Amino acid sequence: METLKIIGAVITLMGSIALLLGALGLVRMPDLYNRIQTGTKASTFGTMLTLFGLVFIFPGWTGKLIILILFVGISNPVSSHVLARNAYRAGVPLTGKTTVDRLAEDMEKKNVEPKNDAQ
């Protein structure tokens, strides 16, 4: 029983480290879109690892924790996609280093202009 708690603690610590590295990575990113992408990957991975570690520490909560892991794995990327898409529509500029803008290409094909809903 003690071995499972140690394994759970190590996995939970790995999740915490992933969250910390993601937070540090946010500072290094040049624009909003890169920050959203970095934050999403780090927080999704770190949170899922932390919850998975808790499965070993609290085996009675396994079902609930698995549901939470699935929820985080689905909702976090979807919500960040919506945030980035709406930021683009609001006219938040890309960094100068961006070389490919596929959303602009798609919008150009469909003759759609970005809307500025923030006004």
Image (spheres, helix red, strand yellow):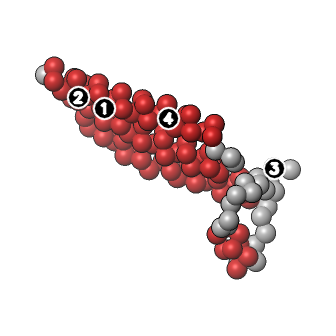
Q: Residue at x 44, y 35 (%)?
A: 18
Q: Nearer the viewer, mark 3 or mark 2?
A: 2
Left or right: where 118 falls relative to 57: right
For the residues bearing labels 1 and 3, Cβ distance under 8 angstroms: no
- Return the residue nearer the eye: 62 or 102: 102
Left or right: where 34 falls relative to 67: right
* Residue 29 x, y percent position in the rendering: 64, 44
Task: Give the distance between the C-alpha atoms of the residues marked 4 and 2, in whole angstroms.
Answer: 21 Å
- Identify the residue at the far top of this view: 2
Question: Which residue has dot 2 on it?
Answer: 7
Left or right: where 108 falls relative to 4: right
Task: Give the distance between the C-alpha atoms of the residues marked 1 and 2, in whole angstroms.
Answer: 6 Å
Question: Which residue has dot 3 on it?
Answer: 118
Q: Amino acid at mark 2?
A: Ile
Dot 2 falls on a residue whose secondary structure is helix
- Identify the residue at the far right of this view: 119
> Callout 3: few (<14), some (14-19), or many (20+) C-alpha neighbours within 10 Å?
few
- Circle on res. 11: 1
> Callout 2: few (<14), some (14-19), or many (20+) C-alpha neighbours within 10 Å?
some
